[in-house]
Amino acid sequence: MPDGGVRPLHLDLDRERGLTIDWSDGARILLPVAVLRRHSPSADQRELRAEMARNPLAVLPTSAQSSGPLRADAIEPIGHYALRIRFSDGHDTGIYTWKYLRELGGQHGKPAPKP
């Protein structure tokens, strides 16, 4: 489990806004769709982030499947340790572990109001 036993208690996917996660330590974080897509843990995205770090003028690829604003169309549990997110641009190869989602929340997430 991430962060010494902290685990997700509830997930709420708003396809346009992002993924809200309620954590067992009381934190409630919204990870915007663009952040989730940009920081996908897939091999191709890791390589793209490394290339962007080396060459800030690198041209970002576009997807022929993309039409309209980027959305997170679905989430799929992977065992008891991760999620797969399917995006409207066709990307769905990243496996987001709970630990990775917690790290992303700390770096790029937004506190989400309690319901």
Image (spheres, grey):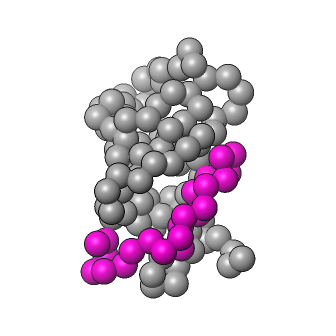
43 is higher (above) or lower (below) than 95: above
Q: Furthest-bottom residue in view?
A: 25
Q: Residue at x 63, y 35 (%)?
A: 70
Taking depth in this image into account, of 77 and 110 the one nearest to the observer is 77
Is residue 6 within the magenta segment? yes
Q: Furthest-top residue in view?
A: 64
Taking depth in this image into account, of 8 and 101 the one nearest to the observer is 8
Relative image position of residue 99 (x, y in whole percent):
33, 64
Query: Residue 6 appears in which quarter of the rendering?
Result: bottom left
Q: Residue at x 50, y 48 (%)?
A: 75
In the image, 26: left or right of 46? right
Is residue 78 within the magenta segment? no
**Which residues lie in the magenta part?**
1-22
- Quadrant of the image containing the N terminus: bottom left
7 is higher (above) or lower (below) than 16: below
38 is higher (above) or lower (below) than 6: above
Q: Is residue 97 visible?
A: no
Q: Is residue 31 visible?
A: yes
In the image, 106: left or right of 18? left
Query: Residue 92 appears in which quarter of the rendering?
Result: top left
Q: Residue at x 45, y 84 (%)?
A: 25
Relative image position of residue 96 (x, y in whole percent):
37, 52
Relative image position of residue 10 (x, y in whole percent):
53, 70
